[in-house]
Image (tube, helix red, strand yellow):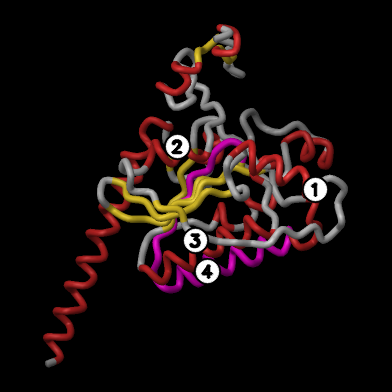
């Protein structure tokens, strides 16, 4: 094996890391703590109980509404390269024995951009969870709406937001985990509508990027603006969670949710008995 191919460089501190080190530390630099890009499959594996994840089917025919040159070839190439059907890997998995519908956006698939297929997958995730009475956990990572699909990609913002609202009205628990980057139409729709919002350290979270905002308003932005730490400080993120701790934190939330459901059921049973 070529040793140089077995080494990658941290984009934060420029330290050289072997592939085995990257896997051991879940793609987090052990020197500076920077959270580097992680594949959707590896993220799922780091969260769920071994062997518990079952992919959900959501077949969406390919569409190229703008006849965008080379778009179909690009999607076919990404499917082969990533092993994913589209920009989201989603299914039902268990975390410490508690089931949830889990969706992970892939930045390897056109930067996790949201088009028709991604919108349908996210919507299906919420509808499946609603039918089965399960919580939803979404790991968001996106550059925004998919320009190759024009207005149809922007329509997914309303579609996914409506799915979240229906799910919420039926009492479902939705946990969003915002990773780097979560921007554009995804940040302006389902990614920021959760009951509990977690974020990875250093994640860029916002609609337009800092440079675009500075050019538009003609002012310098505050230090760290749109990063997870700044948003936590200003109340837009509930907690920043390191990747190595994410499974434990999610497990704790699901456990508390289960307890709350049981207490609510016991109260309702008590009230019904009282009426009799």
| Residue plotted at (38% across, 59% down) | 135
For the N terminus, which image quadrant?
top right
Q: Nearer the viewer, mark 1 or mark 2?
A: 1
Q: Which of marks 2 and 4 is in front?
A: 4
* SS at mark 3 in the image: helix
223 relative position to 230: left or right: right
The residue stretch that appears in magenta: 153-181
Residue 71 numbered mark, or none = 1
Question: Counting other residues with Cα less than 10 Å from the Cα at mark 2, is it few (<14), some (14-19), or many (20 or more)?
Answer: many
**Whether residue 235 is visible:** no
Q: Alpha carbon of mark 1 to alpha carbon of mark 2: how far?
A: 36 Å
| Residue plotted at (72% across, 36% down) | 210
Q: Alpha carbon of mark 3 to alpha carbon of mark 1: how far?
A: 26 Å
Residue position for label 2? 240
* SS at mark 2 in the image: strand
Q: Alpha carbon of mark 3 to alpha carbon of mark 2: how far?
A: 24 Å
Foreground residue, 153 or 269? Answer: 153
Q: Along the polypeptide, which appears first: circle 2 or circle 4?
A: 4
| Residue plotted at (71% across, 58% down) | 62
* SS at mark 1 in the image: helix
Q: Which of marks 3 and 1 is in front?
A: 1
Residue 165 numbered mark, or none = 4
Residue 187 numbered mark, or none = none
Residue 249 to residue 6: above or below = below
Residue 125 numbered mark, or none = 3
Q: Alpha carbon of mark 2 to alpha carbon of mark 4: how far?
A: 25 Å
């Amino acid at each position: 094996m070529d040793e140089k191919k077995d080494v990658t460089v941290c984009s934060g501190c420029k330290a050289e890391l072997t592939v085995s080190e990257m896997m051991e530390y879940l793609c987090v630099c052990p020197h500076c703590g920077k959270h580097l890009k992680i594949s959707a499959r590896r993220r799922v594996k780091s969260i769920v109980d071994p062997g518990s994840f079952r992919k959900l089917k959501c077949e969406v025919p390919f569409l190229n509404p703008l006849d965008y040159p080379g778009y179909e070839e690009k999607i076919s190439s990404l499917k082969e390269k990533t092993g994913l059907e589209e920009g989201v890997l989603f299914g039902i998995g268990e975390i410490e024995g508690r089931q949830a519908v889990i969706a992970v956006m892939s930045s390897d698939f056109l930067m996790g951009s949201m088009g028709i297929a991604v919108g349908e997958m996210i919507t299906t995730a919420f509808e499946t969870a609603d039918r089965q009475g399960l919580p939803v956990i979404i790991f968001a990572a996106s550059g925004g709406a998919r320009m190759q699909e024009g207005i149809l990609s922007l329509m997914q913002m309303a579609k996914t937001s409506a799915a979240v609202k229906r799910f919420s009205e039926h009492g479902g628990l939705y946990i969003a985990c915002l990773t780097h980057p979560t921007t554009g139409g995804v940040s302006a729709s389902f990614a920021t509508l959760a009951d509990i919002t977690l974020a990875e350290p250093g994640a860029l979270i916002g609609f337009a990027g800092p440079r675009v905002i500075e050019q538009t308003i003609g002012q310098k932005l505050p230090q760290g603006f749109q990063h997870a730490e700044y948003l936590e400080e200003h109340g837009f993120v509930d907690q920043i969670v390191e990747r190595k701790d994410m499974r434990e934190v999610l497990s704790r939330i699901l456990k508390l949710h289960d307890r709350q459901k049981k207490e609510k059921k016991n109260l309702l049973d008590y009230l019904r008995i009282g009426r009799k």
